[in-house]
Image: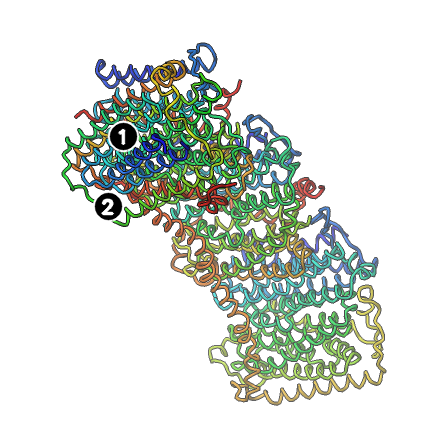
Amino acid sequence: MKVLVGFIILWPLAGFLFNGLGRNYWSKKVIAYKATGYIIASFIASIFAFLHVQEHGATSVHYFDFINTATLKIPFDFKVDALSSLFLLVITGVGSLIHLYSTAYMKEESSAHYARYFAYLNLFIFFMLLLVLGDNYIIMFIGWEGVGLCSYLLIGYWFTNGDFNYAAKKAFIMNRIGDLGFLLAIFWMIFKLGSVSYSEVLTAESLAKLSSADITGITLLLFLGAMGKSAQIPLFTWLPDAMAGPTPVSALIHAATMVTAGIYMITRSNILFSHSEITQTVIAVIGISTALLAATIAIKQNDIKKVLAYSTVSQLGYMFLGLGVGAYSGAVFHVITHAFFKALLFLGAGSVIHAMHLEQDIRKMGGLKSKLPITHITFLIGCIAIAGVPPFSGFFSKDEILAAAFAKSPVYWVLGVIGAAMTAFYMFRLYATTFLGKFRGTPNQEAHLHESPMAMTFPLILLAVASAIAGAIGIPELMGGHHWLSHQLSTIVGEPTEIGLSHATEWLLMAVSVTIALIALLLAVIIYKKKTDEVPNSFIGKFFYNKWHIDELYNTVIVNPLNRIAGFLKNSIEKQVIDGAVNGTGKLVQYSARQLRLIQNGQVGYYILFMVLAIILLFLLWFNDTLLLRLFHNSIK
Amino acid sequence: MLLSFILIPFVTALLLLFIKNGKSANTIAIVSTLGTLVAAIVLAGNGAVDFNAPWIPVLHAQFFLHADGLAKILVLLTAISFPAIIIATSQNQPKQKNIFLSLLLFAQNGLMGVFLAGDALLFYFFWELALIPVYFLSSIWGGEKRIAVTFKFFIYTFLGSLMMLIGIVFVYMHTSDQSFLITSFAKANLTAGLQVTAFALFFIAFAIKMPIFPLHTWQPDAYEQSPTAVTMVMSAVMVKMGLYGILRWLLPLFPTAFVAHINVVVILSVIGILYASFIAIRQDDIKRLIAYSSIAHIGLMNAAIFSHLQIGIQGAMIQLFSHGINVLGLWIVADIIEQQTGTRSMQQMGGLAKKQPTLAILLVGFALANIALPLTNAFVGEFLMFNSLFQYNIWVGAAAGVSIILAAIYTLNMVQKVAYGEVSTQINQMQTINKPAQIVLIVLLIIVFVTGVFPQPLFDLTADSLQQIFVK
Amino acid sequence: MNAIIVSAFLGVVMMFASWSIKGENKQKNIALFGLIFLILANLAQLNGWFVAEVDTNNMLSFTRFGLYTNTLFYCLTLIYIWINGEEISKIGNHAADFYALFFFILCGASILTSFNNLLMLFIGIEILSIPLYILTGSDKKSLFSNEAAIKYFLMGSFSTGILLLGITFIYGATGSFNLIPPDPSVLNEQFMFSAGLILIFAAMNFKVSAAPFHFWTPDVYDGAPTVFTSFMATIAKSAGFIAFINIYLVQYKPFEKTWGIILPLVIISTLMVGNVTAVFQRSVKRMLTYSSIAQAGFMLFALYGTSSFANEGILLYIVVYSLASVGIFAVLVKMKENSFEAFHGLAKTHPLLAFLTTVFLCSLAGIPITGGFFAKYYMINAVLIAGAGIWLVVVAMIFASISVYYYFKLIQAMYFIPGTPAIGELDKSYTYKLAVLAILILVLGVFPNLLFNYLYF
Amino acid sequence: MPIQYYIYLCLALFSIGVIGVLTRRNAIVVFMCIELMLNAVNLLLVAFSKMFHGYALAQNATSTTGIDAQIFVFFIMVVAAAEVSVGLAIIVMMYRNTHSVDINFLNRLKN
Amino acid sequence: MSIIQILFFALSAFAILSAIMVLVSKNPIHSVLWLILVFFAISGHYILLNAQFLAIVNIIVYAGAIMVLFLFVIMLINVKKDSEPQKQFLVKLLGVVAGGSFLTLLVALVKQTAQIQGRTLLMKDGVIGLIHPLGKALFNDYVVPFEISSVLFLSAMVGAVIIGKK
């Protein structure tokens, strides 16, 4: 097992080193083969690991001690259990496909940059694997920050573009805010429990050691970390900007894997979260708000990737809603299905962009159905899946979350259904504008329209199949399935509990949500089959189009004041107050020197006068208590 | 064994004064510093070592050198830094190379002495000895405003060390056996009130040296104006003198006073961390940016030490080493850029990644270490330090934690402005970077990552010092 | 007694030499041999080999400390003349007469190291002072020298009057001129005695140029020919310190409480005047005169912390300070002008000389590995042992860091500012002589105990 | 005769000397005032000498107590004479160079 | 009031008056002459105190030699009458105030000194002021300072040579 996990982890790292160090030496072909091959190797190893878990249950392996001091021991341990093995498969599986896709998508890059791209991508997989495999929060944090780094590097992959760099920086810094929360939570655990290992923290004994305030604090801080990584309100604005990176990157990092790390983390520590009512409510509220907010924005966006990005944010909000209402396995289920269909959508979008020569504005597309048949079909499957149309995968996962939400509070459910409707609407708005109607681009673009090469379409097809059938792993018992996934995860999140709804209610809810989604879907297709959205006029339309002005809000409320404070400190406090005090001391000495030397006026008479006065002063000092009092008394007796 | 750390640099420095040929002087200096490095590695592998010889019998001062884990890790840092600095800057050293190198080695001599001295008077001696060559180096070969700036630095630190001298004499008088040995100092008969006095006197010296807010203003100026080789010495090794002083002298000798001042110092340090980070955000001068970043990092180490928890002090000990390596790397990169473009303004840079990909990668590597990304060496230390601050007080820990965000902001700003974007005219002038500097940077980067993944040897090295502090 | 007799005799010899032996080099060599003989004679007494037994009626008492101090004075003078011989002969054509005056001064200094009676104090101080008036005015054509001489003379005489009034009061109170430790309990109301102490204190402060009796110092040292400034500021002043310590130890110590207020004030004002005023000087020579005031402030610590430790300290201080001052003045003598500008670029043209000057300056500033560090160290330690408030030392050290400012200004001028130095002819041997001084300073900076090994046994 | 009378007299003379030093500008007159101070001290010494002598004499008819002060006076005169010779030489030298004996005339050494 | 007291007061008044005249006279020659009168008055006091040797020496050395030297110098340099520039009035006043407070302080001190309260001094009796006991003391107990003071003269001589010689 030690060797196997080592394989899983080290193949991507080897790929990183190979491509990173040899970027000037290898040909593109070698780079592509190696990079993809290593991930596939890792995927195969992951399958073995998964099977091992199925057979023997969870195992943890110890490599070396990362930190081992008298007060704190942090081993470099990995844990392969039901949850992590599942994530392993998703990461390496989707990762392999996206690597494969990238080999074609990035063809135009020079070989050094091509290698750099794959090095980053491999490194990302490496860190992502650390994140899910770690047996304690530190290892998770290492992966956590590592994927952030890779995200940063990949968003800013085209580094000569200033905006892209800015987006990359923004992503990293926003992630860091979350990371600080995560870190503080770790500190809190160490402070109270003296350990960060799952096996010691996530137990009933350690829970007993924590007060409810501790648990709330820790979980809220952990959730802050998840907010940063998984782009929840208020730390979500980086994700749409992150679309500056190459499209496969968006698919892998900003849709399928990294952004779901928050869900992984909370699911991993579900014991803690379940013990804090406050945190759960916070998570649910923030989740559903994010889902709705992002959905409203997505409706009005015209950039194909931006729509998908907001859609991702929105879907992540659903997952958090799931977490907040205690449907951990539902959230994980949605992570998996979302990984498939969102990766598929992004890759499809990439294929479109590829065909359109880097054009991303959907208003300039249209009618691509015939030109890009495979892309079209797969994209459509993705859209159906995300819209929650049965029997595609999105339906099952979303429904599970909604059902759990209803059980908790019908308000969640109502809002969730509204969100689902909007999802269906904007996805099909996107689909219709892009693939239906007439081509609206330049003739030049039209002439060069072509279906993407095999390396790109093959992943699309595979993912489309996955999106379509992945629901099978979580068919609820209601429909005669036995929900393989929730049983699978039972060791982590506990046996699925009865949510306490009658079958009739469940069927009703399902029907209502599907109906609403279908209506929205059809509405979108009808509206956008022919026409496109120009810049909106209505207030609400503008408001959504401008993303609720949240970026501007952040600039005025946070960024600018910070800059001003920094400028004030630099220019006023540092220069005038502190340095001024230091230099002032020097000036004071100089000034006194100038004054003191004037006493030395060169005249003997004055000198002697000063001496006499000094003698008098000495007398006065010596006799300070007696002389003045008794100066004119005759006798001392 | 220990004497070699004093003698090798000293003898070489004297020898260099008579070697006019710059090339051979350089070779000798490199060989000498590498020799010291070998000795330091051997030392790190051994247990605690002492060296004792009489010095000034009238004063009962002894030439007592002592190497425990804390000393060893700093000796190692010094031993790594100097060859790295000399090799990396060997292409652009000034005309009178032999004197330049000689002064550098004198500084190394002083630094080694500071870290090894087990006798207070000897400690003070080396403390000053480390300062004076640096003063000359900066004043002769520094930038435009070098004279005034270096002078400010010199007087500032000199004032501090004079206070420490008073403190040393003060404690000496209260030792039972009239000795300057640290062991006697530890047994000195000091009441709480006297401890506070002695503490204050020592602390001023260390605080100026580190420097702690608000005594820091000499530092950015001095870093900016000094020749980069000297800046590297100051930033990578010399500022550690202050922290070392606290760990070696302040904490064990005046525990009562130390505990009494924890709150003040920690809060001051945390203010300093945030303050310096904020200023770094607005810096356009790359050297000043690194300087302020260094102030912030040092402030964190100081705060962690003063949180007086084992975990924080352990972290600080590791970080002493790690920060030295990281900041050394950053300075070397900054130096190469400055030397080749003639500017320090980041606004005029950009596109390094396109023009000099290797250098850009190295820069990013050290920048990541600077923001304490996991698996870099800085993470280990900072993790423990923040941890201890958190345990000291949740809110202080959280406030200090904000600095990791700020650090990301200014470091990435730097990376963005220097490495990314279109190639600027200044960056376009750059020639190929010389191989030795590149090799040094790569070695340093390897150290960064190796100690980041396997920090345990460093923990083992410093464990005995930590135990000494906490066994009492 | 050996030393007093021999030095007086040697003075007479030099007087005769001034007209019987021509050639300044010869005269210098005679003086050097005389000094060696003087040292030997003094060592003879120190070791008890040969002692001229004279009944001094308990007016002089030859302690080991006093005799050892004599040796140091003689050695310093030997070094001083060895280095500055040529320069001395350049002033007028009285080289041998100057040497005679040096011997007389040494005679006065020897009295001051051993007096046990206020009469001998008075005579010693006068023997010390009168030749100094003459040396100050020896450059007859120079108006500066004239001015300095007349200022020095008038103020010196005035302070003599003060000293005498003080002595008279003490006599009036005790009926004796001997140095007798007063009984503080009886003398509580004995104001006349206290008045005498204060007046003597003022006069002695004048001799050692402590503020606020320092006013003569800058003008006189500045106006006097530089070679003689070098002698006056070092050996002559140090003799004053030894006298001050001798009398202070016996008569002032019992009043510790009162002097605990006054002496620190004097020390701090001296440090302030010396250090702060020196900051703004444009002439190196004048800067050095102010710095000599500042150094006096440190030497006064030896009074504050009267103990055997303080005595060792003052010896070290005297030796180190004198060596450094003699060195720096010897450099200054060779400069064509006294301004800082004259030193610009010296390091380029005369690297060794610049380095030596740096050593001297570092020693004056009290930087480790030069003797000046241990000198200051001893002073601090002595004061702290005496139980002074730590604030006094802290203030002193703040002023010490100010002193770095002006000393290093000269280093900056030499090393960091380009230019052509205004330096006169300089032969190699002169530099090497200065190198000997620097080596002595550096040796004392690492092994200060070399100086004390002979003090006890 | 009470000793105070003599003390007051001598202090008065001494202070007049001091005042003279402070108020006159002629170097020679200043110097003369210093001599006046010395003489005041001399007289005071003799007075003290007679005071102690008087009490000692009452105890012991052959006592010479107090003689030391008179000897001291003698030495003060010796010193004064030596000082005068040097002092006047300096004043004359100054006069030769500047044709003035004003102590404020030479005033280049300052600050 | 005994004759001695009368003499004392007369001499004292004379001495102080003459001393004041030394300051007040504008012409340095007059100052010298007044100073000589002070010395005479002081010699008178010496005689009152039966210190005849000192009285004579005072006349010979001070009035006779030193003052003549002063006169000689003044004549030599031919300081014209009233040529001396005067100090500013304020400076003079300051000088007087300083000297006056100096005097006041010392007088106050003497007044309060317990030991000399009621002590008197022997006026015309006692032999210590005569030449025989003085000579004996000088050449027995005080021979060392006596010899040493020759050094003083030697240095003064050298000084006169150095400074006086053209």
Mark whose residue sits in front, 2 or 1: 1
Q: Nearer the viewer, residue C302 or E58?
A: E58
The amino acid pointed to by label 1 is Phe
- Cα distance, mark 2 to mark 1? 27 Å
Q: Position of residue C28 (x, y in %)?
A: 28, 18
Q: Position of residue B306 (x, y in %)?
A: 63, 50
Pointers 2 and 1 within a single chain: yes
Judge from the rendering whether residue E156 lies leftward or rightward of residue C76; answer left or right: left
Residue situated furthest top in the rendering: C50
The amino acid pointed to by label 2 is Lys
Asked if residue C149 is positioned above or below residue A343 in the image, the reply reads above
Q: Which residue matches tag 2? A: E87
In the rendering, which numbered label is found on residue E39? 1
Is residue A30 visible to us here? no
Asked if residue A283 is positioned above or below residue C349 in the image, the reply reads below
Asked if residue B106 is positioned above or below residue A403 in the image, the reply reads above
Q: Position of residue B34 (x, y in %)?
A: 52, 36
Asked if residue A17 is positioned above or below residue E113 in the image, the reply reads below
Judge from the rendering whether residue A30 lies leftward or rightward of residue C416; answer left or right: right
In the rendering, which numbered label is found on residue A367? none
Please tell me how crowded label 1 is: few (under 14), some (14-19), or many (20+) other residues with Cα within 10 Å. many
Q: Nearer the viewer, residue A402 or C31?
A: C31
For mark 1, name the chain. E
Q: Position of residue A12 (x, y in %)?
A: 65, 56
For mark 2, name the chain. E
Judge from the rendering whether residue B61 lies leftward or rightward of residue A58; answer left or right: left
Q: N-terminal of the two: label 2 or label 1?
A: 1
Please tell me how crowded label 2 is: few (under 14), some (14-19), or many (20+) other residues with Cα within 10 Å. some
Q: Nearer the viewer, residue C331 or A420?
A: C331
